Image (cartoon, rainbow, N blue to C red):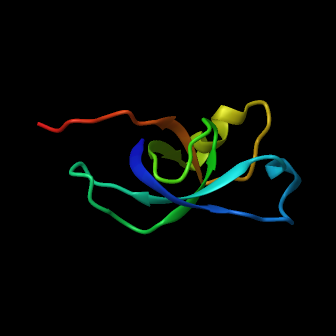
Amino acid sequence: MQLALVIGDVVATIKDANLAGAKLLILQPLGPSGDASGRTLVALDSVGAGVGERVFFVRRREAAFPFYPAEPPTDATIVGIVDQWTTG
């Protein structure tokens, strides 16, 4: 899992049928200190996150697991909203 900040949303009127009703959000991955780390990406939302929230997300095959038994074509999915985090 990785941390990210939701920085926007995506509206797509024509998309794969398995994405119907799914919310797409733009994420900026974050490092442990909270600074931007890496390239932005689009992820499916499985938890009701919104712009400005810190979230954690999964990539690859695991990204489809929250939607089982459906298998949406996704490379990244938000699986949690972060309340806080601390580093040593």
Q: Nearer the viewer, residue 85 or 76?
A: 85
Q: Pinpoint residue 15: horizontal percent, then vertical percent.
A: 83, 62
Please name the residue shown 36% across and 66% down the image: 38
Drawn side of residue 51 relative to residue 13, left or right: left
Q: Extreme bottom residue here?
A: 39
Q: Pinpoint residue 26: horizontal percent, then vertical percent.
A: 55, 61
Drawn side of residue 38 relative to residue 15, left or right: left
Q: Nearer the viewer, residue 61 or 39?
A: 39
Please name the residue shown 32% across and 63% down the image: 36
Q: Quadrant of the C terminus?
A: top left
Q: Pinpoint residue 30: horizontal percent, then vertical percent.
A: 33, 55
Please name the residue shown 75% across and 47% down the image: 22
Drawn side of residue 67 relative to residue 84, left or right: right
Asked where in the image residue 1 lies, by quadrant, the reply is top left
Q: Nearer the viewer, residue 63 or 87?
A: 87
Q: How many marks?
A: 0
Please name the residue shown 41% across and 51% down the image: 4
Q: Nearer the viewer, residue 81 or 74?
A: 81
Drawn side of residue 15 relative to residue 9, left or right: right
In the displayed structure, would residue 26 be above or below residue 55? below
Q: Pinpoint residue 12: horizontal percent, then vertical percent.
A: 78, 65
